[in-house]
Amino acid sequence: QVQLVESGGGLVQPGGSLRLSCAASASFSSINAMGWYRQSPGKQRELVATFIGGTTKYADSVKGRFTISRDSAKNTVYLQMNSLKPEDTAVYYCNALVITSMYWGQGTQVTVSS
């Protein structure tokens, strides 16, 4: 079992920035992939950014604006979100894949509005 604890969501104006954090209860050496998904009302959950296989992957809609990073000493993954747009409004979920088991955080709300 891997527990994921997210923090950092909130309300921000368009063009603003937020940083999300996700702390895992397991070491990165035991995690095959870890990153962020988001879900807006009435839409399917979608990949935002993730570490997988030693590389990073981003959704086209966030490339150049969002950056995923990690601190192995803290077992923590971050999502720096810049130039936020209203369409980025969603619940953001941290995700970890361990072999074939998928784990999710509780979600953190990000609202981009003036």
Image (spheres, rainbow, N blue to C red):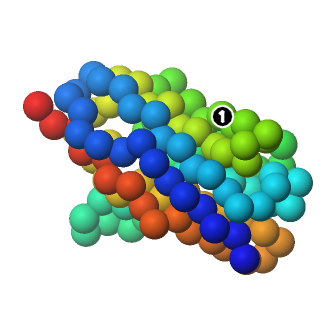
Percent from the top left, x then y, of residue 59?
52, 44
Q: Name the kind of residue labelled 1 in the image.
A: Ser
Tell me which corner region of the image, top left, top right, bottom left or bottom right, holds residue 111: top left
Residue 54 lies left or right of residue 103; in this view the side is: right
- Across and down, in percent, residue 63 comes to 52, 31
Q: Name the side, left or right, on which 32 lies relative to 68.
A: right
- Out of 87 and 36, give the one closest to the viewer: 36
Does the image show residue 19?
yes
Q: Residue at x 86, y 61 (%)?
A: 30
Look at the image and tell me whether residue 46 can be seen.
no
* Figure quadrant of the C terminus: top left
Left-right relation of 1 to 53:
left
Classed neighbour count for the residue bearing mark 1: other residues with Cα under 10 Å, few (<14), some (14–19), many (≥20): some
Residue 22 spot, x, y in % from top left: 57, 50
Name the residue: 72% across, 43% down.
Answer: 74
Q: Residue 88's quadrant in the figure?
A: top left
* Residue designated by label 1: 69
